Image: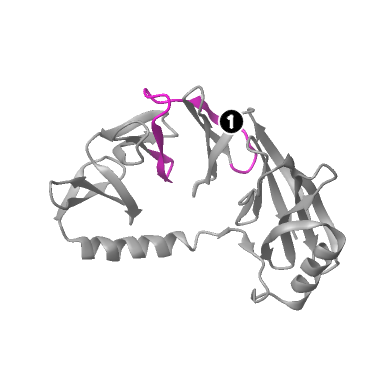
Amino acid sequence: MKLKKKYRFDNKRQIWRIIPTNTGKLIIEERQSEEKQVYFHCLSLESGKKILSNFQLDDKFWVGVEAVQNDIIFFHKFAKPDMPKHRGIFAYDLTKKEFLWQNPELIFLFLFDNKLYAYKDKFEGRNFYSINADSGELIEEIGEDFQRINNLRSQSNLEESNEGYLFPERFEADSAVDIHTIEFIKSLRNNFVISGTIEYILKNKLLMTSFHEVNSKGSFNNLFKAVDLSTGKYILEEVINKETDLFLTDSFFIKNDLLFLLFGKTRLEVYKIIY
């Protein structure tokens, strides 16, 4: 077993979101808070080849991504600057590199069965709608039936949970893992001066861990280590954050057979798991 580096992405800007799509693409959102700029990128998920680079909307900062489906990015704006409430849906086609449709009044909820569910605020309550995700055309005005919306949202969440993602968990004394994993994590605590918790992902016999080691300056180095439990050998060892005073979490995740590893706040490396 090995981890083969496929590509790296680094523009020296803070990476805000990493979104692998169901059509073999990777969406990356970068933010520069002081300059109030946000940039969106699209890469080939397999090769890292650039498909879209440094894309910006007319509003250069108060925008974000709601979801990506079938090569369409659904952007949102904000009701007011510095306020978290989203406003508007702006559907951008990655293949055509153009906006397919826009609705500045609706607020995105979720996608399910190629329909986009959204709402408008009323003085009291909300009106819900189902929209054709490809065209933006109204399919149904659902009204105030929040129970139906909650049921559909549950189905959507269940569908999303089965998309091949694995995210780090905190290792606890009662974590449901095998004896080999427990023994290896215990060995980390014996071999390193670790402060805080150990995060891990276990995929078959591949164990990936992230933890903070106290360094000689009294700050932390955030280490990533991947081990093949069938042989007990390390297959990847990296310092992903140096001399930090913070406990940094969620620096890696798995999508199918790809590992996404974040170095600091600005560099992403993508590895393929080879069995």
For mark 1, what is the residue? 50
Q: Secondary structure at mark 1?
A: strand
Q: Is residue 80 left or right of residue 144?
A: right
Image location (x, y in percent) of residue 213 = 78, 52
Q: Quadrant of residue 142?
A: bottom left
Which residue is located at x 67 percent, y 64 percent? 203
- The quadrant of the image that shows the N terminus is bottom right
Q: Is residue 220 left or right of residue 28?
A: right
Badge 1: residue crowd in 10 Å (few <14, some 14–19, many ≥20): few
Q: In the displayed structure, would residue 79 be above or below residue 215?
A: above
Which residue is located at x 59 percent, y 43 percent? 45
Q: Quadrant of residue 190?
A: bottom right
- The quadrant of the image that shows the C terminus is bottom right
In magenta, the rendered stretch is 45-74
Of residues 217 and 75, the one drawn nearer to the viewer in this rendering = 217
Q: In the displayed structure, would residue 123 be above or below residue 174?
A: above
Q: In the displayed structure, would residue 25 be above or below residue 187?
A: above
Q: Is residue 150 left or right of residue 169?
A: left
Q: Per the image, is 53 magenta?
A: yes
Of residues 203 and 237, the one drawn nearer to the viewer in this rendering = 237
